[in-house]
Image (cartoon, grey):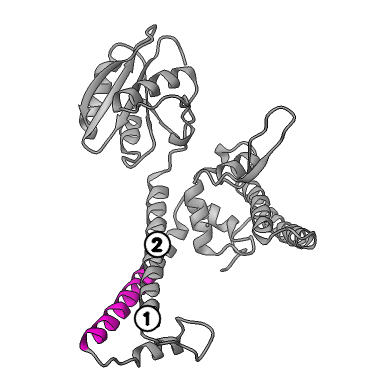
Amino acid sequence: MTKSTTIIGFDLHAATTVAAVLLPGQRTPALHALSSDIPTVVRFVERVRRQGRVVCCYEAGPCGFELQRALANREMQCDVIAPALIPRRPGDRIKTDRRDASQLAILYRAGALTIIGIPTEQEEAARDLLRCREDIRADLLRARHRLSKFLLRHGRRFTETKNAWTKRHRAWLQAQHWPLAALEQTHRAYIRAVDEAVARLQSVDTELRDLLTIEPLRARVERLRCFRGIDDLTALTIAAELGDPRRFPTAPRLMAFTGLVPSEHSSGAKQARGTITKTGNAHLRQRGAPAPVIQQAWHAQHRLNRRYRCLAARGKPRPHIVTAVARELTGFVWAALTQ
């Protein structure tokens, strides 16, 4: 960061914003309280910019990327910071908006912050719809659990087949009758909740398939579908959540982003590795993909299959095997998307 650059660190909230302005040559930022509407913040930055070059930053959070895009449209640099990777002193137990904004400005000047990739509006829209689908799936799971537990409490068990939520199970549910009106109403209400969640999920699935052909997701989806086990929606999820894969210079960097690398706490001669970090932010499979990607996906399928069988033969626990295979698959995905 040049010595003539002014740093502005924002601590954004729904109603209020604190701006910490760190002028060149100064060690302590000047603090300003603002409202959180975008035009007000942009006007404030423009006033500061009259004195020289300005670079802004704020933590990624519920306020999204609207401020970053508004400033970028006016040719002002604004970076969004990964909150989990902000250095924090172990003994610091005081957290306020003013301190957070000041720390952002100071650490940004020192180059101690990690900048995240900004998705395009199309990528963010697809990602929001995909996360909406995950919420609907969770709602459906809860609705089914409530219905099944209600039936179990009253001794109603489906025993015709081993699998539930099939056509036969549905017919069995509809055939249930109750001696009391309150129980009948409860049963029908739980069934309606399941039906509504299923309808919502089907509607979102249809809308998501319309996003498979939009740029810049289309090319990524075509390459990802070459891999066994990755269908349209899984490919779309990876493409939207990952963003531009070229921001990861190596495959291990992408593995670390997905949280599929083991945690480690080693000191001196002692080495200790634990569970994976879990950081960072899941059809016509080969049509339209480049030939090298198809060949690479075929190679990945054989290699990962051999690795799974080898680890299983060594007696490794299945969750460990799945994690190891997923980590290696991440490397193949990185190679396919960055060619």
| CB within 8 Å, label 2 to label 1 | no
Picture coordinates of residue 80, whole percent (x, y): 41, 33
Total labels: the figure holds: 2
Q: Residue at x 73, y 58 (%)?
A: 316
The crowd level at tag 1 (other Cα within 10 Å; few <14, some 14-19, many 20+) is: few
Provide the major secondary structure of the magenta segment.
Answer: helix
Residue 183 in magenta stretch = yes
Q: Which quarter of the rendering shows the C terminus?
A: top right
Q: Nearer the viewer, mark 2 or mark 1?
A: 1
Which quadrant of the figure has residue 207?
Answer: bottom left
| Of 66 and 152, the residue lying toward us | 152
The crowd level at tag 2 (other Cα within 10 Å; few <14, some 14-19, many 20+) is: some
Picture coordinates of residue 286, whole percent (x, y): 62, 63
Going from the N terminus, do you reach mark 2 or mark 1 first?
2
Magenta region: 181-203
* Left or right placement of residue 29 versus residue 205 in this view: left
Picture coordinates of residue 156, whole percent (x, y): 40, 87
At label 1, which amino acid type do we have? Arg
**Which numbered dot is residue 59?**
none
Residue 191 in magenta stretch = yes
Per the model, the C-alpha gap separating discs 2 and 1 is 30 Å
Q: Is residue 261 visible?
A: no
At label 2, which amino acid type do we have? Arg
Which quadrant of the figure has residue 47?
Answer: top left
109 to 148, vertically: above or below: above
32 to 3, vertically: above or below: below
Residue at numbered disc 2: 133
* Left or right placement of residue 279 versus residue 37 in this view: right
Residue at numbered disc 1: 153
Q: Residue at x 31, y 78 (%)?
A: 190
| Circle 1: element type | helix
| Of 221 and 173, the residue lying toward us | 173
